[in-house]
Amino acid sequence: MSKQSTSFEIGFALGSVVREFRRALSRPPVVVQAQAPVALSVRRIEPAMLAGPTAKELEHISDVPAIVRLKKVNLNDWYLTNTREVQKPKRARKPKPAKATAKAETPVRKELKLGSLDQLIAPVDPLTS
């Protein structure tokens, strides 16, 4: 950055700060009126509500399932109506494969034949070796 642009940025920032301070000082202070609590809206909490469930109630809750406590369901009847023995699925029979029918004539492929490699190897001159 050049010296001119740096001094411009500093001046701009200081001007913004001064402007915000002046604006804050020129405004009248905002006074918020605190509302006094209304006697009807304040409710006394009963000590029984603070105590929570007793030890006997907690034991009953932990021992008895919720479906029995809330819906009064007999678990023996529920078990008989909602469960059943799983049947082992029978194996599906697979039909025997049909005998192969005569296929259409297939083109004969040329197969590689094994043979002498003499034609591929260059002749060796016995005098030069």
Image (cartoon, rainbow, N blue to C red):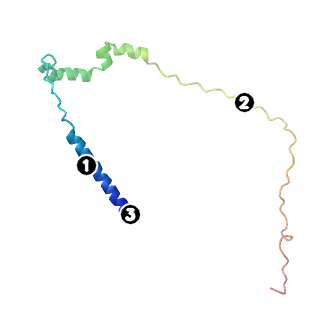
Other residues around mark 2 within 10 Å, as few (<14) / some (14–19) / many (≥20): few
Which label sits in the foreground, 1 or 2?
A: 1
Classify the position of the C terminus by image quarter: bottom right
SS at circle 2: loop
SS at circle 1: helix
In the foreground, 107 or 95: 107
Q: Residue 18 carries which label?
A: 1
Confirm or deny contact between disc 1 and disc 3 (CB under 8 A): no
- Reading the image, the residue beneath label 3 is 2
Q: How far apart are marks 1 and 3 (CA)?
A: 25 Å
Label 3 vs 2, first from the N-terminus: 3
The picture places residue 127, in percent across and down from the top left corner, at 84, 87
Q: Which mark is residue 1?
A: none
Which label sits in the foreground, 3 or 2?
A: 3
Give the residue at x 36% y 15%.
76
The picture places residue 92, in percent across and down from the top left corner, at 63, 26
In the foreground, 44 or 39: 39
Q: Quadrant of residue 39?
A: top left
The picture places residue 111, in percent across and down from the top left corner, at 84, 55
SS at circle 3: loop
For residue 77, side relative to residue 28 (left or right): right
The picture places residue 44, in percent across and down from the top left corner, at 12, 19
Label 1 vs 2, first from the N-terminus: 1
Q: What residue type is labelled 2?
A: Lys
- Reading the image, the residue beneath label 2 is 96
Q: In which quarter of the image is residue 98?
A: top right
For residue 8, side relative to residue 37 (left or right): right
Label 1 vs 3, first from the N-terminus: 3
